[in-house]
C-alpha cells in the first residue's frame, strides 16, 4: 500500500466532499426509526484518523450522527474480551446474504444467527455481555470503551433515538423472542432489546468515529484495547459481514473491512494505516449509506488503500 501524503490526502477529502455534495441521487433516509427520518439527507462528512491521532476531515465532520449498527463492532470487541471463543457457540461467522433484520435463517439454523453483525447476531452479543449485569452497567462499559478508543469523553447516547427505536422494535423483539424459544437468549428479551436499542443510539461525529476505529488499525500509536490476533479477526468479520447482503459489493468496490449503520455512517479500517469514518444519511437498497460507499470507493482508489494488494 502506498504511503500517504497528508496535504494530498486533505485535498482528496475536500474533492470527495465537493463531489458528494453535488450528487442528486442520495438514497433514502431510514424511516422505520422515526427519529432518524428527521435527519437532513444533504449532510455529508468524511474523516480519516492516522495512527498518531491526526485527523483529516471534510464536510460535517463535527456533527454527531446516530452510529446504529456500527455499535456492533464495539460490543463484539467487548464480548470477545469477556467470553473469548465461547461466544462462537451462540453466533456464527458466515455472511448471511440477507437483509440486516431478516428472520429467515434463524428458524432453519436453530436460533444461531449467521454472524455478529446482522441484527439477530448483534442481539445475541448484547445478551451475552448483559448476563449478570444491569443494562445501565453494560451501556456504561460500552461508552467507556468507545470514549477510550476515541480519546474523547464527549460521546453519549441519544435517548430520543433509543425511545423512538424501542417503540417500533417489533422485528428485533421477534428475533429475540425466537432465539429465546431456541434457548439462545439468557435475559428477558425486553432487557436485551432495551440495551440493544440504546447501544445503537450512541451518537458520534465522523471525527470521533474515525478516532474510535484506530483500535482496529493495529499500528504503533493506536490505542491497544484488543490483542492483534483479535483485531485481525474483527476486521475479517467486518469484511465478510459488515454490510449484510451488500458485503460482497462493498469488498469489491472499496476493498477494506467496513461496518455500516442505518444512520448513514460507515467505519472502514485500513490495517496498519488509518481508520476512516464517512456519513451520508441516505441509504441504498441494502440499508448501507449510498454516498458513504461511493466516497469510500473514491478515497480507496485515490490512496491505493486496499487489503487486497
Ligand atoms: N438499530 C437498528 C436496528 O436494529 C440498527 C440496524 C442498522 O444499523 N443496520 O434496526
Image: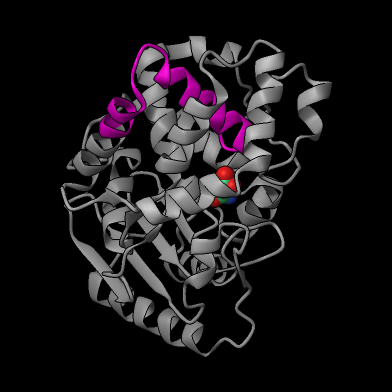
Rendered location of residue 255, percent (x, y): 56, 53
Q: Position of residue 114 (x, y in %)?
A: 68, 28
Residue drawn at point x = 49 percent, y = 22 percent = 127
Q: Residue 200 is drawn in which quadrant? A: top left
- Toward the viewer: 272 or 160? 160
- Residue 139 part of the magenta-drawn span: yes
Residue 287 placement (x, y as % from top left): 64, 58
Number of numbered tags placed on the structure image: 0
Q: Nearer the viewer, residue 46 or 255?
A: 46
Residue at the extreme front of the image, as rendered: 167
User: What's the image's color scheme?
Assistant: one colour
**Residue 199 left/right relative to 6:** right
Q: Residue at x 49, y 86 (%)?
A: 19
Quadrant that contains the N terminus = bottom left
Q: Is residue 264 visible?
A: no
For image coordinates 43% across by 76% down, the residue present is 44
Question: Between 158 and 247, which is closer to the camera in this rendering?
Answer: 158
Q: Confirm whether residue 246 shows in the render.
A: yes
Q: Relative to residue 184, is residue 200 depicted above or below?
A: below
Drawn side of residue 145 relative to residue 245, left or right? left
Residue farthest right in this picture? 108
Q: Is residue 82 magenta?
A: no
Residue name at image x 39 percent, y 29 percent = 77
- Dominant secondary structure, magenta: helix
Q: Which residues are magenta?
A: 116-141
Residue 303: x, y in percent? Answer: 42, 66
Q: Is residue 285 left or right of residue 220?
A: right
Amino acid at each position: 500500500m502506498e504511503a500517504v501524503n497528508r496535504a494530498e490526502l486533505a485535498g482528496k477529502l475536500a474533492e470527495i466532499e465537493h463531489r458528494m455534495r453535488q450528487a442528486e441521487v442520495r438514497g433514502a433516509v431510514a424511516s422505520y426509526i422515526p427519529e432518524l427520518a428527521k435527519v437532513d439527507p444533504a449532510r455529508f462528512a468524511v474523516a480519516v484518523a492516522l495512527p498518531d491521532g491526526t485527523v483529516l476531515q471534510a464536510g460535517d465532520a463535527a456533527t454527531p450522527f446516530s452510529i446504529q449498527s456500527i455499535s456492533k463492532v464495539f460490543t463484539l470487541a467487548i464480548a470477545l474480551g469477556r467470553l473469548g471463543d465461547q461466544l462462537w457457540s451462540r453466533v456464527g461467522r458466515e455472511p448471511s446474504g440477507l437483509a440486516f433484520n431478516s428472520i429467515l435463517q434463524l428458524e432453519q439454523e436453530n436460533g444461531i444467527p449467521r454472524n455478529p453483525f446482522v441484527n439477530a447476531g448483534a442481539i445475541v452479543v448484547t445478551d451475552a455481555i448483559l448476563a449478570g449485569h444491569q443494562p445501565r452497567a453494560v451501556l456504561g462499559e460500552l461508552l467507556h470503551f468507545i470514549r477510550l478508543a476515541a480519546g474523547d469523553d464527549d460521546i453519549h447516547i441519544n435517548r430520543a433515538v433509543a425511545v423512538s427505536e424501542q417503540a417500533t422494535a417489533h422485528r428485533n423483539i421477534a428475533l429475540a423472542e425466537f432465539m429465546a424459544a431456541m434457548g439462545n437468549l439468557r435475559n428477558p428479551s425486553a432487557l436485551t432489546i432495551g440495551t440493544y436499542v440504546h447501544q445503537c443510539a450512541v451518537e458520534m461525529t465522523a471525527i470521533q468515529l474515525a478516532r474510535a476505529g484506530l483500535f482496529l488499525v493495529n499500528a504503533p500509536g493506536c490505542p491497544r484495547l484488543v490483542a492483534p490476533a483479535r483485531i485481525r479477526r474483527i476486521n475479517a468479520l467486518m469484511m465478510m459481514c459488515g454490510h449484510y447482503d451488500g458485503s460482497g459489493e462493498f469488498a469489491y468496490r472499496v476493498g477494506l473491512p467496513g461496518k455500516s449503520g442505518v444512520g448513514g455512517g460507515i467505519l472502514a479500517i485500513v490495517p496498519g494505516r488509518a481508520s476512516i469514518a464517512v456519513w451520508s444519511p441516505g441509504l441504498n437498497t441494502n440499508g448501507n449509506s449510498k454516498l458513504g460507499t461511493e466516497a469510500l470507493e473514491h478515497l480507496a482508489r485515490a490512496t491505493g488503500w486496499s487489503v487486497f494488494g
